Amino acid sequence: MSKTRANKPHREVTKHQLSHWEQQKKRQRFIFITGVSIIAAALIIVGIGWYFSLYKPMNQTVIRVNDTSFNMSYYIKMLKYYGKDSPDYYMTYVASQVVSVIQQNELITQNAGALGISISDDEVENDRKSRNPPLSKDYRDMVRAEILTKKLLSDYFDPQVPASAEQRHIIAMLLESESQASEVRARLEAGENFAELADELSLDSYSKSNEGDFDWRPKGILPLLVDTPVLEEQAFTSETDVLSLPIYDAEKTKNVGYWIVKVLERGKEDEEGTDHIQAILLGSEEEASEVRARLEAGEDFAELAKELSQHTTAENGGDLGWLSPGMIGSPVDDFAFNDEIEPGTLSEPLRDEAFTTKGGYWLFKVLGIEEREIAGENRDILKANLFEEWVKSLWDNPENIIESYLDGTKIAWALERV
């Protein structure tokens, strides 16, 4: 006889249990919604932070050239490209230069068409991809400007340079004073070698590095090589094989100067290592010796500094203020911070090659005069000069709107990203 399974009693859900379950569900929903809300709020906060700290700054306009604007993201990419091989300490300088590069590239792009020079997008893409390594699309504007520059030089400015012209073969050197130039001239007349003396003594970098030989040059080249018109003006009116007298050039800059220094006060005990210094920077040892003699004779230091010093403190009577060693340079430091020297003592002329001064004397000779083809370096220099004059005219054109909204804070922010 089979056994019959007993039916389990049906369990009724009480109102209390239903209420408890409902409360649990409500708590779970509350916890879930609260959690989602917290996550959403965190994402919103992160998003807002990202927007204001990165997205918005990256997309703000920082440079404008007429109707074309460039944002911070573009500026940073250019900064990375042009500064990729630069040391960190040099990047602040690069940062300011990149602003000008972006503006100039855009000026060239906007105005090349008016000279009949243009390039296609395909040319830009092919050039960009052919680089090693290939450049990203971010640098298309830069590539376009570089190609346009090459075409402007070859197709527009090169035809403006004459095929030939009278040229002169010149040797020249720059000396700091008339007395030195006269002395060197006497040595040359006595048979000493021009190249050797130019290599040893010339204060013009091109003359020194080329042992005084400027080679064959048409008009328009020498002022670009030595940054002064005086040498060309004299050389193109001179006869051949005649060693010139010393020719003064008031505007020629050279990397040497001479200090006359006076310590006004020594630092107090709590300011040890600082001195109050007055100084005059002059262009030659000869001039410095003359000024020192005038000071010894009783003339006022401040008045002579205002009249003659080539340092930026001339207007302040040569007052350099309170300085510590290393702030002005070794020649001044060696005198000013020597405790054996009494305050008020005048230094002898102190030669300093870390400062630039104006003024010098040329000695030159024209070795030959011929009508010659303008080719090679001469041609490249002349057409590059024509190009630079055209670019300068774009910068100077008041109709061009050229603006930068980058200040020190924004540049520092960009450099951090780089």
Image: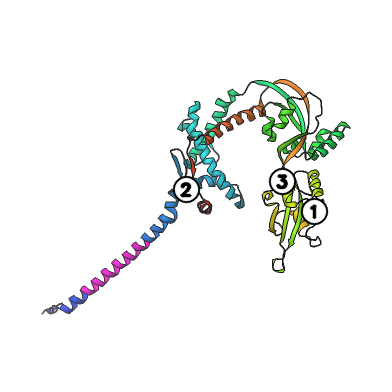
* Mark 3 nearby-residue class (10 Å; few <14, some 14–19, many ≥20): few
The span picked out in magenta is 22-43
Q: Secondary structure at mark 2?
A: helix
Give residue 347's mark.
Answer: 1
Question: Percent from the top left, x then y, of residue 192?
Answer: 86, 34
Say left or right for 382 vs 180. Answer: left
Q: Residue furthest left?
A: 1
Q: Amino acid at mark 1?
A: Ser
Q: Is residue 252 above or below residue 349?
A: above
**Mark pair 3, 1: CA separation:** 19 Å
Answer yes or no: is residue 236 visible.
yes
Number of the front mark, 1 or 2: 1
Question: Front-most of 326 and 251?
Answer: 251
* Quarter of the figure with the N terminus: bottom left
Question: Front-most of 404 and 282?
Answer: 282
Question: Front-most of 228 and 292?
Answer: 292
Q: Give the residue at mark 2.
A: 72
Q: Give the residue at mark 3.
A: 307
Number of the front mark, 2 or 3: 3
